Image: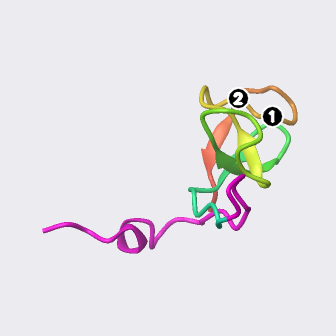
Amino acid sequence: MAIAYDHLKADLALCTGTRKAGQQCNGTVHVCGQCGARGCKQNRPGLCSEQAFDVLDQCLKCGAHAMQPAG
């Protein structure tokens, strides 16, 4: 039995940013423990309007590797 995406992410903060193709991101939101930047993680820069981290968990604002789950 497959689990619905919305059910899997029910307890997580979801990104409300817009992806390049125009749809809502819905990625998991993280926060930087160093500077407080908040947003999703993507595999390339510029894929979401609310992106805060790259694929290596590096904050795009301050450069720290301090990604934490958003509470």
The image shows residue 53 at horizontal and vertical percentages of: 70, 38
Q: Residues within 10 Å of mark 2 (few under 14, many from 20)?
A: some
Please tell me in which quadrant of the rendered image residue 34 appears: top right
Give the dominant element type of the magenta stretch: helix, strand or loop. Answer: loop
The answer to whether residue 2 is left or right of residue 48 is left
Which residue in the protein does label 1 denote? 60
Q: Which of the two residues, 29 or 47, is positioned nearer the viewer here?
A: 47
Q: Is residue 10 above or below residue 66?
A: below
Image quadrant occupied by the C terminus: bottom right
Please tell me in which quadrant of the rendered image residue 32 appears: top right
Mark 2 residue element: loop
Residue name at image x 67 percent, y 33 percent: 44
The image shows residue 64 at horizontal and vertical percentages of: 77, 27
Mark 1 residue element: loop
Residue name at image x 42 percent, y 73 percent: 6
Give amino acid for label 1: Leu
Give amino acid for label 2: Gln
Magenta region includes residue 2:
yes
| Circles 1, 2 touching at the beta carbon (< 8 Å) | yes
Q: Is residue 35 above or below residue 26?
A: above
Please tell me in which quadrant of the rendered image residue 15 appears: bottom right
Which residue in the protein does label 2 denote? 58
| Identity of the residue furthest to the left in this view | 1
Q: Tell me the magenta residue range.
A: 1-22
Q: Is residue 3 above or below residue 44?
A: below
Residue name at image x 87 percent, y 31 percent: 62
The image shows residue 47 at horizontal and vertical percentages of: 70, 44
